[in-house]
Image (cartoon, coloured by chain):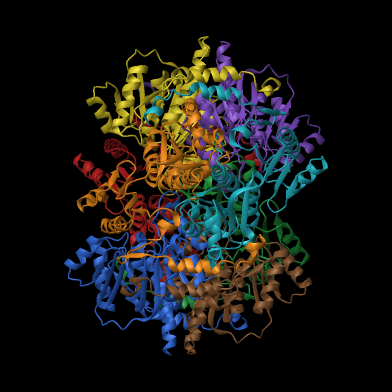
Chain colours: A purple, B orange, C cyan, D blue, E brown, F green, G red, H yellow
Amino acid sequence: MADIAEGRVGIDDATAQLRRLPIEQVDRFATLDTHRHLRTGFPEVIFCAGKTDDQIVAIVRVLADREGCVLATRMRPETAQRLAAEGLEGVYHDGARLYQLFRTPRPAPVGHIVCCCAGTSDLPVLDEAALTAETMGSRVDRLADVGVAGIHRLLRHADLLQEANVVVCVAGMEGALPSVVGGLVSAPVIAVPTSVGYGAHFGGLAPLLTMLNSCASGVTVVNIDNGFGAGYSAHLINSRIANAAKGAAA
Amino acid sequence: MADIAEGRVGIDDATAQLRRLPIEQVDRFATLDTHRHLRTGFPEVIFCAGKTDDQIVAIVRVLADREGCVLATRMRPETAQRLAAEGLEGVYHDGARLYQLFRTPRPAPVGHIVCCCAGTSDLPVLDEAALTAETMGSRVDRLADVGVAGIHRLLRHADLLQEANVVVCVAGMEGALPSVVGGLVSAPVIAVPTSVGYGAHFGGLAPLLTMLNSCASGVTVVNIDNGFGAGYSAHLINSRIANAAKGAAA
Amino acid sequence: MADIAEGRVGIDDATAQLRRLPIEQVDRFATLDTHRHLRTGFPEVIFCAGKTDDQIVAIVRVLADREGCVLATRMRPETAQRLAAEGLEGVYHDGARLYQLFRTPRPAPVGHIVCCCAGTSDLPVLDEAALTAETMGSRVDRLADVGVAGIHRLLRHADLLQEANVVVCVAGMEGALPSVVGGLVSAPVIAVPTSVGYGAHFGGLAPLLTMLNSCASGVTVVNIDNGFGAGYSAHLINSRIANAAKGAAA
Amino acid sequence: MADIAEGRVGIDDATAQLRRLPIEQVDRFATLDTHRHLRTGFPEVIFCAGKTDDQIVAIVRVLADREGCVLATRMRPETAQRLAAEGLEGVYHDGARLYQLFRTPRPAPVGHIVCCCAGTSDLPVLDEAALTAETMGSRVDRLADVGVAGIHRLLRHADLLQEANVVVCVAGMEGALPSVVGGLVSAPVIAVPTSVGYGAHFGGLAPLLTMLNSCASGVTVVNIDNGFGAGYSAHLINSRIANAAKGAAA
Amino acid sequence: MADIAEGRVGIDDATAQLRRLPIEQVDRFATLDTHRHLRTGFPEVIFCAGKTDDQIVAIVRVLADREGCVLATRMRPETAQRLAAEGLEGVYHDGARLYQLFRTPRPAPVGHIVCCCAGTSDLPVLDEAALTAETMGSRVDRLADVGVAGIHRLLRHADLLQEANVVVCVAGMEGALPSVVGGLVSAPVIAVPTSVGYGAHFGGLAPLLTMLNSCASGVTVVNIDNGFGAGYSAHLINSRIANAAKGAAA
Amino acid sequence: MADIAEGRVGIDDATAQLRRLPIEQVDRFATLDTHRHLRTGFPEVIFCAGKTDDQIVAIVRVLADREGCVLATRMRPETAQRLAAEGLEGVYHDGARLYQLFRTPRPAPVGHIVCCCAGTSDLPVLDEAALTAETMGSRVDRLADVGVAGIHRLLRHADLLQEANVVVCVAGMEGALPSVVGGLVSAPVIAVPTSVGYGAHFGGLAPLLTMLNSCASGVTVVNIDNGFGAGYSAHLINSRIANAAKGAAA
Amino acid sequence: MADIAEGRVGIDDATAQLRRLPIEQVDRFATLDTHRHLRTGFPEVIFCAGKTDDQIVAIVRVLADREGCVLATRMRPETAQRLAAEGLEGVYHDGARLYQLFRTPRPAPVGHIVCCCAGTSDLPVLDEAALTAETMGSRVDRLADVGVAGIHRLLRHADLLQEANVVVCVAGMEGALPSVVGGLVSAPVIAVPTSVGYGAHFGGLAPLLTMLNSCASGVTVVNIDNGFGAGYSAHLINSRIANAAKGAAA
Amino acid sequence: MADIAEGRVGIDDATAQLRRLPIEQVDRFATLDTHRHLRTGFPEVIFCAGKTDDQIVAIVRVLADREGCVLATRMRPETAQRLAAEGLEGVYHDGARLYQLFRTPRPAPVGHIVCCCAGTSDLPVLDEAALTAETMGSRVDRLADVGVAGIHRLLRHADLLQEANVVVCVAGMEGALPSVVGGLVSAPVIAVPTSVGYGAHFGGLAPLLTMLNSCASGVTVVNIDNGFGAGYSAHLINSRIANAAKGAAA
């Protein structure tokens, strides 16, 4: 603690670093953080909800040109059609509402993430998580419909779960899956509540609270339906482990 | 449906029945439903929260004299001492805060209820449920600390659970236990959320929502910390099954 | 408690049993629990909300072929039309949005359940509960529009209510019906809040809280609009009583 | 509507009236509305919560001297002792935490209000309502412990309820009482939810929502535990009816 | 209290009365309380939300034939067209979504109610309240757009407000109107929160809480957007005062 | 405090002033406060949500004729087209859903407000705030997409922010922007949460709570999506400072 | 907008400024922002809740020595006694729980703020607001107990309110005061909800929602009981106006 | 996906594994999962809230004897004194309320975690997180009082933050810290909301929602005040990276 308490150490480096951070202004509506790739390991991701098609097209074009790869989430199908019509060559995933564009060759996926979900209706969120991690470079296995009311469906995959560097658990309804998985594995578990449910589910509040109160240790939580956030964090963890194993600091 | 739709059938019986229902007024503050024993199978139970010691003593005395047995819940320890000092001979259970008094011999317990709880801290509520059902005449087995984060603790009791006529599941924190149990048994499951937890637990709201949204079928729910209600309903179900097996209608 | 506390009893049986539990994987999106029929007395029920028509058709077909009977809830009318077009011969109930398919002869209904609802607008949920219990094999009587603001409408059916093995009470608005019924009968009462209401009803929260706080003992609660869950639990209780009366363990 | 739409009618009267309204400043902390007696029929009532004993003593003294009668609610017992020690001669009601002081002879009570409550624990709020209406000059009957889970306890008082000009219904737990009473009487019903309950009661939220969503017409609601407000409104209605019957405008 | 405490007084009358209460079963979906007119002063009112057009037509027809007058609320315009097509001769009020049908001559309106609202957008709820009271026989004045942010708009109507037997205050946004009106008048005030607002208004929760916490005495509250309930209660109060003045018991 | 405590000072002025306040009744549905321009510095602003097109046209016409300028918020595009068709010459801003009409020359804008927002999707609310302040006469700079997850995007505008008389901060998602800005500037900061987000965002509740709990001093908050309110308050502050600098009291 | 959009302008100034910002580390638990005085016009204020007495003493000592003045809020009385015992010479204000220490002469207060509150129980929060603004250098008038249920109590102060540069409105219960004040004045209004109330007040949620939904323009809101925040923002606005009038930029 | 879909792979291993899992029953109240050390890398941790001192002593003794190390959280100081009196030799940390006991030599800490908190009052939660990770074997740096309202306090530690394998961010009030940190680093960030705050903070709900809605990617969240959970997950991630770098599988 002593060293840190002096506090002034490194202030010149901090401001020097800030000075170097570039942006790119897209018209008046977006300020792209073009330094993010270096700073956080991946270009800025586009959250499409609330943006007009014109805005999305402009941002995708700038990112494709500058970064060579684009990841966009919560995209309406019509926007994907518009992007194709504009000559942008990405791939759109229907259920997950996710758009990927790659102009540079993709390296072999690294490490190992398992993404599992409790019910069939949770699949779109599972796919958003898995596709995000895959887009960023992780190797991912998927397990669907392994909810706790038929516990043997999950237990038969115990070995696979225990081999993963990170497990992403997606669940709507009561969201109990991460508590059982968290007790089976020693890897960190990232829990994603979904809005699948009705009545006293309150749009995902029920599984969100379940996951925050999990009696299993090692479980952290992201926002309701935030498959992207879970996949992103899972990749950060998985790639660091994989890179460390290769002898390269992340 | 046809018969029922006429609607007037039975109206004389209904009013005749209502006419027969006696009460006993205790001072100005309580109106005891002395017909309840016949109508619902057990004398009125005293919910002590919010009542003064004077009121509780007066009600216990009337019920002891008229019914021969008393069940009182949510009783403060000081009230139990006061009852003893007044010469009332019941037994007080500390953790469960429950008071029993019997002046008539108790018949052999019938049927089979299993009451299980997720954590050590849930024990007082488990005991309130089990003691209630036992007071009313059911045979009860208890399983403590079998929460889902160490799923093998629960699975080793699968046989016992599958033999029960009813299972009561008590759980705080995220309250996932009834979902797993509901998938293991064919008996009805009564789920009791507890206020054991903190933060986004909101005093038991988290496990309450979990249980209401359970993906396991056959699970019904009572109020937070309502061990009494669960034990009462469990006994109603269990005694009807046991009585039916004996060839006597409940 | 002594026997149970040893804990290791039965562990071989438990794992042996788990080993035997079969599943059937339907494409990548569903993992059917084909052992459930034996374990819990009824094949897996399909919750259609959030599933695509393609997924539902595939699951219905597998269950129809393997189990001979299918129960599906929350089905859109278009899905029912699609199933018919695919040659699946089930029956769709409009208000209840419930689908039944039977390929084997149905046994005579057993026992006695009364399903009552407070208002005309609660009928679809009442029907979901009653149809679920009937599909599973219970005998059911229905009482519609017997809410407590005209208490004589309910009281005239007191005899019928008191003959039932279980009573299901469906109510929106303030949801007071189960409290009055719970005081009239000695059978367990399963309360179903509905989303019928407006303003401070908050989509069914008001009657849900009412029912959880019922001053009548013997009332347990299911999720808002969960007629299926109430009917399912009611059948579990009713069939056990009926079977016990016949001398056959449930 | 035409007459009102001109809008300027009466503006001189309005401002003239405002000009006449007197106040009395008590130190810097209170601005007594000494015109309220004339304008609304009763002197300002003191809500003691959050006020210091010094402040309450000062306000009671001013009101006693100017108005000849004082009504104070939510008073701590210590404050009542302090008032007595200061020579102020009022009466303190323990359960209701209400303080009355009269220096002028009280007229005979008028009209008829029935105040009923569901459980023994609701008595303090019932008393606050009844004492408030009595202090203001109404005749009040009380019915305690007539909750709906033993409906015959309430029905035997149907005649009394139907004779009242107004009925005040006080209930904690699920708060179903006003819905049943509202269906039995043609008088307006004022419903008071209480904080008596636990768990998903949320400090009175449950019966508050119940009462706001009552399926019985003619029910209006006041804040949780607000016996004062219910008694005050009940008196306004009752005294107007009684006065009209006497041929005197309220 | 002494007389009431005996409790058995009147039990024969109560059951005798219950025996006399008739109903009329409409198909299987509705149980009309045809005794309500005598018991509560007005025939059963139809709450149309959640009912099918077929159900509404059937109920309107029975009530029109038996009672000679019909009041239906929350009616969709298409339902009104269907009723007209079926030859039912009632009047539909667009904004208020309220339907009236009279087959008997209407007596002259009695007493005096003032219904006021805070903003133009609250008019439909104001109209539901006013039309309900008028349908039942009360004389009503309306004041629109007199919210507290321009307090002189309200103050100029102080005389009119002070002449009323009851005041109904309708307000969305922050719902402050009843607090100001409650301080100006000695009549009871019935407050109606509306869903007019956005953001932290939470569909009317904001003005509902405002009104429940009003610092003005004499204010009672109904559910969000429940103009009907306010008009109904206002009429109960107003007609009793008017009838008492005429020397006729209500 | 002494002077104020006497309380009666100024009462004649107050009523005299109230007497002078004119209104204009528009049909029965609106009561325009035509004195507001003098009293608060700007004519009444029209909140269009919940008003019919007919009502809006009538109000715009009266205000245009009497005041020479109109500001209307939350206007549907169809209403703007209707206004144009009726010959009213105002300008409609699409994203902000705001309508301006000027018949008198606009003075040069005064002072300096900076309006910034966290994300591209917050732009419509930013524009509502900025256009409101500009309509009222303030000079405004806009900064878009400067959210805290790329803090250098904001820091590069530190000088501009520090020159402003007031800063308006618009943010959805977690709403952290005002906390960082509040620590950088000595001007008052007005924070506007937006409904941009999903899941546990609860329609803007998340950033609203964030802003109310800001650890930065000098931050006040308006309702979710209330760009109008922020712009209005910002103008009140900015114009007073600008006017004071000019030697003219606001 | 053009200039700002280039974005890189000023980046060197921003980082240069950040480099200059000093801190002072107090043991390991606090990092004082000693540059804040220059940057925001006042030294860092100490929020005492959650800090130990030892921590508070250490921070007060550092600030007193470096800045010559200290403002601390939410201080327990025992902490104030401890500070006095340690020889620190500040003044503690009981109700407001606020501590001031000045070692340099205080300049004459500038400008004009009016702080008003609805009820006597709101006084501690009013005082926290007024004392904060006074500590920072503003001139403040106080108006207590002017709630809207006796509107003439407020209206008699209309002139005083209209002379203020800023008005702070403090109110518990339903919190309607700022809506009325906002309609009377052209100055910005800062609204402070308080936790004074009970039941459906939910600890201040009711007046908080009221104030956020105010139909009066020009009202911004701070957290429940946050008198400090309101006083701080009021001073920022008032001092800028006063300084502008003196010809000195703030 | 193909391989996994077959589903039956590994079922024998799964049940074989389950069969091997030992427990130790402590009296009737606790079922220790003595296999957890092997399965998840650390012995079972004791959550003391809700447990009696007797229960805690018994569990600590069993774990100390079997595992050689004990970690207990949320321990009351009196319990720690009792443990010492019983001869158990652990260390109790006051602020963090955490108890550690080691009977075996501790290996050198591995990897690098940075734990930072926003305010001095958040220190106890920071310490719970840091001590948990240290107990499990991680190297931890602490940064206190670096909240975003003085952003330069945080930025000067940018280099340290960027070197960490994981960052734990603890914050009460509005909880904005993780959003800023998440934008500065490429490591995963674990956010811990605390209950430090008041009013619309709702016991930590405000920062919890903030963190769940963070616009920074790579942020996951644990329950309010759950320093333990954050430290546990941080260690899982950090130790895997450190172990991978050493060439040893976690």
Q: Position of residue F228 (x, y in %)?
A: 59, 55
Q: Nearer the viewer, residue F145 or H231?
A: H231
Does residue E213 lie above or below H202 as drawn? below
Report x, y in % for residue G122: 36, 59
Quadrant in which the C terminus of chain D is drawn? bottom left
**The quarter of the displayed image where residue D114 is located:** bottom left
Q: Residue at x 35, y 59 (%)?
A: D121
Residue A89 can be seen in this image: yes
Q: Residue furthest top?
A: H247
* Tally of numbered discs: 0
- Kindly identify the residue that appears in the image at 50 percent across and 85 percent down: E242
Q: Is A74 drawn above or below residue C203 in the view shown?
A: above
> In the image, G115: left or right of F40?
left
Image height check: is C50 above or below A117?
A: below
Q: Nearer the viewer, residue B216 or A68?
A: B216
Q: Is residue G31 visible?
A: no
> Relative to the observer, which residue lies in front, B226 or F64?
B226
From the top left corner, tell me how far across and down residue E218 is, in percent. Answer: 43, 72
Occupied quadrant, residue G140: bottom left
Q: Position of residue H122 (x, y in %)?
A: 39, 35
Q: Is residue G198 above or below residue C10?
A: below
Quadrant placement of the N terminus of chain D:
bottom right
